[in-house]
Image: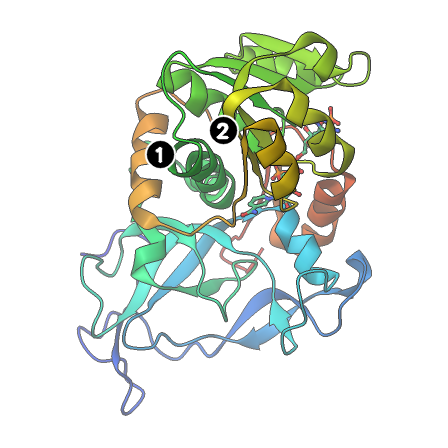
Amino acid sequence: MCVGACYGFDGGQASGKGKNYMATMTGITTMKAVTIHRYGGPEVLSYEDVPRPEPSADELLVRVHAAGVNPVDWKIREGLLGKAPLPQILGSDFSGVVEAHGTEVKGFNIGDPVFGVVAEESGSYAEFCLAPPKRVAIRPLPLDDVHAAALPTASLTAWQALFDVAHLAAGQKVLIHAAAGGVGGFAVQFAKWKGAYVIGTASGPGVDFVRGLGADQVIDYHTTRFEEVVRDVDVVLDTIGGETQERSWQVLKRGGILVSLVKPPDQQKAAALGVRGEILYSKSRGDQLAQIAELVVSGKVKVHVEKVLPLREARQAQELSQSGHVRGKIVLVIDSQGG
Ligand SMILES: NC(=O)c1ccc[n+]([C@@H]2O[C@H](COP(=O)([O-])OP(=O)(O)OC[C@H]3O[C@@H](n4cnc5c(N)ncnc54)[C@H](OP(=O)(O)O)[C@@H]3O)[C@@H](O)[C@H]2O)c1
């Protein structure tokens, strides 16, 4: 069935000879995308025409309607996470419609509204991206593209840190650093949904924002040292690293756990204190995204999008993200002319 931007469905194999995928359209060979040809500051971002990707037998080709922006995007741009061959299309999170799929793909059809995380070699700051089905979920229709694109990396990271690594349970106490940020905002809401007592750190207007997300206690990290007012915590979610991580050990109760997203915790220190320290590298899981989308649709979790920009403004989006002071998420939208 075709519900999105479908036209010219040829009802079978893509017209290119020997292509092993099902497609809605033929003849489009280029697309708009935001790429880098060298690593560096925001000035290296280039909005340009690039070849449209083709799905392999086990991939989806998605027409991207919106792309979520994450700090990892500018870290990749700067070459801080290793140096892959260039040019490269940036962006990992997307929401859109299945345009085509490989012959081995099961569970997705052309025209399905989907959201998720791109394949390794692909990027979501583009009109089209590739994604393996296991990284993708069907977008429930009450959830629009902008809010769906804001979900994948941030919400999966919060979910996996709290539930897969820390096994947070009802009645436990959790301290969430940068609770107004992309990951922190979801973590506060997931932890409350689970029945935990939630403490968040934020500053200025972020304090009221985090309270609005349901936190029981919010500490303004500009005016109060959290370790002076928090103790006996079961779980710390460390989104900051550095001295914030160092100062976090002392708020944990014996048997507690610190989960960091940014810096491997010192194992000797953890052992000496009778606590655990883990680093999380989040996994892109469509099954968990589907669960999270249900929470959003049922109103239990809100998705706060601070800024929506057209694809061609990716530089502004990344500069904002890199400032480190966004509340919630930034999303790029791609219109029919490519953004
Ligand atoms: N390992 C993984 O798999 C993984 C996955 C996702 C993200 N990450 C990493 O986790 C970090 C957080 O990601 P994110 O998407 O949540 O970032 P983000 O949305 O950019 O976080 C911005 C928030 O951080 C707050 N903040 C900055 N410094 C703070 C401090 N010292 N104490 C408390 N709050 C502070 C800001 O509040 P103010 O404006 O009040 O300062 C702002 O609301 C990033 O470094 C990201 O790369 C890792």
Q: CA distance from mark 1 to mark 2?
A: 10 Å
What residue is shown at x 39% (from left), y 80% (from top)? 27
Q: Pick whichever of labels 1 and 2 is earlier in the sequence.
A: 2
What residue is shown at x 78% (from left), y 12% (from top)? 224
Dot 1 corresponds to which residue? 292
> Vertically, is 6 above or below 88?
above
Q: Could you tell me which secondary element the residue under label 1 belongs to?
A: helix
**In the rendering, at what x and y percent does residue 255 appear?**
48, 25
**In the rendering, at what x and y percent does residue 265 appear?**
63, 42
What residue is shown at x 20% (from left), y 72% (from top)? 104
> Vertically, is 329 above or below 212?
below
**In the rendering, at what x and y percent does residue 328 appear?**
59, 30
**In the rendering, at what x and y percent does residue 183 appear?**
55, 34
Asked if one can make out residue 139 in the rendered structure from this viewpoint, the answer is no
Q: Is residue 267 left or right of residue 163?
A: right
Ligand 1 under 8 Å from disc 1 Cβ = no
Residue 138 circle label: none
Q: Could you tell me which secondary element the residue under label 2 belongs to?
A: helix
Q: Is residue 16 left or right of residue 309?
A: left
> Vertically, is 128 above or below 67?
below
Which residue is at the far bottom?
Answer: 17
Quadrant assignment, res 200 = top right
Dot 2 corresponds to which residue? 186
Q: How many marks?
A: 2
> Vertically, is 170 above or below 49?
above
Q: Are marks 1 and 2 in contact (CB under 8 Å)?
A: yes
The amino acid beneath tag 1 is Ile
Q: Is residue 109 left or right of residue 192?
A: left
